[in-house]
Image: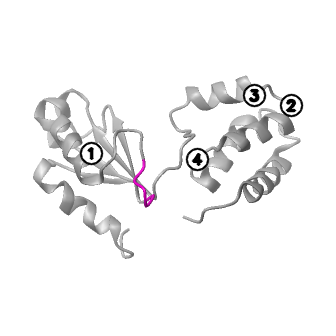
Amino acid sequence: MEVLTQKEMIDQTNAIIDSFLDTRGALIPVLQNAQNLFGYLDQEVLKQISRRLQIPYSEVAGVVGFYSYFSTVPRGEHIVRVCLGTACYVRGGKEVLSALQDVLGIDVGETTEDRVFSLEIGRCFGACGLSPVVMIDEDVHQRVKPATVRDILFPYRTKEAV
């Protein structure tokens, strides 16, 4: 993921905003496009969106804080989600989460220094009979054991990862 300067981020944000200026209810589409482009929503980007759309910053920040889709911290290339719904929790989901935290060296809501992984918690992925479950991006890993998390993560560290 390319690291952009603040000016480059603002310039690209302005281009996004320009494409939505005549759109009613443009805030969420602008936020989505900015996040898709940058991987997260920088505070200066939020301020620029606020200014250009003439929406109070508190409202923009409130929308970002309300929707879990949005992130104000850089996210990894791969999002690792551990299910902690009832079935997964009872069958060792918390231990799997702990193993992932140890292997990745990050806590929930954080991103590895190399920006390869971000760690999140989910509440149910609809695979209760195969718990505990971990999703990496859109890939579902079933019956995960703490001892296998390193092997599960390995392919995502390589260039050939899907």
**Mark nearer the N terminus (1 vs 2):** 2
Q: Secondary structure at mark 1?
A: helix
Mark 3–mark 4 distance (CA, rounded to whole Å): 17 Å
Tell me which residue sits at (62%, 48%) in the image.
Answer: 35
Q: Is residue 141 magenta?
A: no
Residue 78 horizontal/vertical position (percent): 41, 56
Which one is in front, 158 or 130?
Answer: 158
Amino acid tagged 1: Gln
**Mark nearer the N terminus (1 vs 3):** 3
Which label sits in the foreground, 3 or 2? 3
Mark 1–mark 2 distance (CA, rounded to whole Å): 41 Å
Residue 154 horizontal/vertical position (percent): 26, 66
**Residue labelled with disc 3:** 57
**Residue labelled with disc 4:** 40
**Mark nearer the N terminus (4 vs 1):** 4
Amino acid tagged 3: Tyr
Q: Secondary structure at mark 4?
A: loop
Residue 84 horizontal/vertical position (percent): 25, 32
Amino acid tagged 2: Gln
1 over 149 or under it: above or below: below
Tell me the tag on residue 54: 2
Give the main secondary structure, helix, strand or loop, of the magenta stretch: loop
Mark 4–mark 2 distance (CA, rounded to whole Å): 21 Å
Other residues around mark 1 within 10 Å, as few (<14) / some (14–19) / many (≥20):
some
Looking at the image, can residue 58 be seen?
yes
Position of the N terminus by quadrant: bottom right
19 over 53 or under it: above or below: below
Chain part drawn in magenta: 111-115
Mark 3–mark 2 distance (CA, rounded to whole Å): 9 Å
**Left or right of residue 70: residue 118:** left
Tell me the tag on residue 101: 1
